[in-house]
């Protein structure tokens, strides 16, 4: 059996073998810290959509990137981090084309839908007795398909209370997947709010229909399933019955195209490695951890291609940039 990721800390895993973390704030401070050196040197070009990547190894800079506005970038090597959904839709035209094994790997893996809904109340009325409100923790409530309404598409919702995290908020984070997620996030917000208020909120602990605090104040949601740059989805998965998932991700983790000394590599959770811990196989596919670790892996491979060691990294990077 392949577990989604290794036991770490905070929340107990379902199999009881260890803990798993729950980040109860935002990734933003981490992203800003990592990006600071590049942002300070103006190396990150925002709002720049690359639509073409062409290799000519006879040129001093063998890789030419073309943006949607027609701007050209000539570079030595490229790490492509766009989501699997974008790669499957040929968002970037590669010349020469991707080889057959890479194309097959992209085709064999699937790209799923997960959305997050956030609903805010005036107070956290669902909490258990007052003595528990000072403790750090999470409450989960899972709702399966509603039998009381034929007007709502079938699907399940997982309500996660954020009322006892380190910076408590009277908010529920709701996870929803599959076509049900697409169904919900395409609804007008007022209609979605009414749907949740009528069919789900009354089933939470301590609900009182006469209490204004039990009425949703605000609602926000992700719309990754509607976002072209997200690949119209949010995570990679191996289809049921397939036994080649690890093999496909391994293919995508290797050098994709040669270009002089350098080349093209992929990074992202769809290229995640697998590892064996205590006899169990783990993968960081479909996780932020996977996206981060594969980025580091690809960067190291670029450095290796130019025989750059930790001792020569600073001067050699200037040559590449």
Image (spheres, helix red, strand yellow):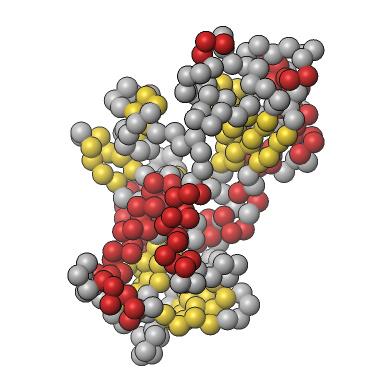
Residue at 45% over, 60% down: 35
In the picture, residue 241 is in which quadrant? top left
Q: Is residue 274 left or right of residue 109?
A: left
Residue at 39% over, 26% down: 11
Residue 198 position, x and y percent, is: 76, 22
Task: Name the one closer to the observer, 180 or 33.
Answer: 33
Task: Name the one closer to the observer, 71 or 170.
Answer: 170
Residue 99 position, x and y percent, is: 38, 69
Task: Name the one closer to the observer, 181 or 238.
Answer: 181
Q: Is residue 93 visible?
A: no
Relative to 321, is 181 above or below?
Answer: above
Relative to 318, is 246 above or below?
Answer: above
Q: Is residue 228 visible?
A: yes
Residue at 19% over, 70% down: 311
Quarter of the rendering occupied by the C terminus:
bottom left
Residue 243 position, x and y percent, is: 34, 44
Quarter of the rendering occupied by the N terminus:
top left
Residue 229 position, x and y percent, is: 59, 59
Relative to 206, is 39 above or below?
Answer: below
Residue at 40% over, 34% down: 21
Q: Is residue 227 left or right of residue 28?
A: right
Q: How many marks?
A: 0
């Amino acid at each position: 059996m392949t577990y989604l990721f290794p036991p770490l800390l905070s929340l107990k895993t379902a199999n009881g073998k260890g803990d798993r973390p729950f980040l109860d704030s935002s990734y933003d401070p981490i992203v800003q810290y990592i990006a600071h050196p590049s942002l300070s040197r103006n190396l990150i070009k925002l709002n720049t959509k690359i639509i073409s990547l062409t290799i000519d190894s006879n040129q001093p800079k063998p890789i030419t990137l073309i943006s949607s506005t027609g701007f050209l970038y000539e570079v030595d090597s490229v790490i492509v981090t766009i989501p699997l959904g974008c790669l499957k839709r040929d968002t970037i035209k590669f010349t020469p084309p991707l080889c057959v094994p890479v194309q097959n790997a992209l085709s064999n893996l699937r790209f799923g839908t997960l959305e997050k809904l956030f609903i805010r109340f005036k107070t956290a009325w669902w909490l258990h007795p007052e003595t528990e409100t000072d403790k750090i923790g999470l409450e989960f409530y899972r709702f399966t398909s509603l039998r009381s309404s034929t007007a709502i598409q079938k699907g399940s919702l997982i309500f996660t209370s954020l009322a006892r995290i380190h910076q408590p908020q009277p908010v529920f984070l709701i996870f929803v997947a599959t076509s049900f997620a697409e169904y919900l996030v395409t609804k007008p917000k007022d209609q979605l709010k009414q749907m949740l208020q009528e069919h789900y909120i009354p089933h939470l602990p301590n609900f009182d229909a006469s209490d204004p605090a039990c009425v949703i104040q605000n609602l926000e949601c992700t719309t990754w399933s509607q976002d072209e740059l997200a690949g119209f989805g949010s995570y990679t998965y191996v289809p049921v019955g397939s036994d080649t998932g690890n093999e496909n991700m391994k293919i995508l983790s290797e050098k994709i195209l040669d270009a002089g000394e350098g080349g093209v590599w992929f990074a992202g959770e769809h290229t995640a490695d697998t590892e064996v811990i205590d006899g169990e196989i783990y993968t960081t596919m479909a996780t932020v951890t996977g996206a981060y670790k594969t980025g580091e892996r690809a960067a190291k491979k670029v450095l290796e291609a130019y025989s750059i060691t930790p001792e020569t990294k600073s001067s050699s990077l200037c040559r590449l940039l």
